[in-house]
Image (tube, rainbow, N blue to C red):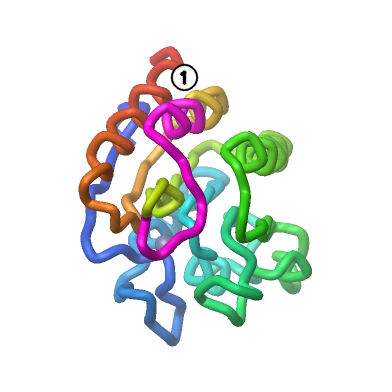
Amino acid sequence: MGGHRLAYALVRPPGHHSERRAFGGFCYLNHNAIAANFLAAHGRVAILDLDYHHGNGQQDIFYARRDVLTVSLHGDPKFAYPYFTGFADETGEGEGEGFNLNLPLPEHLDPPGYLKALQRALQRIEAFDPRFLVLALGLDTARGDPTGTWAHRPEDFRRLGVEVGRLGRPTVVVQEGGYKTRTLGLNARRFFEGLAEGSRW
Ligand SMILES: [Zn+2]
């Protein structure tokens, strides 16, 4: 709100599994939802969740609202936590109908396949035309992450950053999951390099 184009909330524990009435998945406070709710007083907000696991918290919190679009790419809940939400037919309710987009993805997925899904998510966000973007950045899509099944390498994270940066919206990046601690720092660094490159700030 002070005019910076990019902010980074390096928070622990993560928050995106915290719902209105339930917590789980290591999460107690939904930081990305708190930020989005604050920003929503000043314009439309899109939350994009790139964690390996479904962002059930912000889906639950904004499910009946149309001023905050929630989008999540994640391992299909048929095999991935949180198992009971994150299916494609969860699209919102009441005024919020059509303002929740879930893209559940297969257990075995290569980085180009993931990129295709990301491009679909970004198209939906473009169409929504938000004033702000809140990015729930999970790095547990990384190769070797003990909670995930995908294989993103540092260079793949850079590419994802470029794509998100091209949206060109003022962005709050909120740290979510990511448990392969040996590569976590480099993956985050590459993502931010891509974000800066794509957005030309
Ligand atoms: Zn996760």
Which of the 4 quarters of the picture holds residue 183? top left
Compared to residue 20, the image places residue 200 above or below, namely: above
Ligand 1 quadrant?
bottom left
| Residue 125 visible in the displayed image | no
Compared to residue 157, the image places residue 64 above or below, namely: below
Badge 1, how many Cα within 10 Å: few under 14, some, many 20+?
some
Q: Which residue is drawn at 29% across and 58% down?
A: 179
Region rendered in magenta: 145-161
* 160 and 150: which is toward the camera: 150
The amino acid type of the residue labelled 1 equals: Ser
Compared to residue 54, the image places residue 85 above or below, namely: below
Q: In which quarter of the image is the N terminus?
A: top left
Residue 141, image x and y in percent? 45, 50
Q: Which residue is drawn at 45% across and 80% down?
A: 20
Compared to residue 167, the image places residue 23 above or below, namely: below
Residue 58, image x and y in percent? 50, 65
Q: Which residue is drawn at 34% across and 49% down?
A: 174
On the rendered structure, is 83 left or right of 21? right
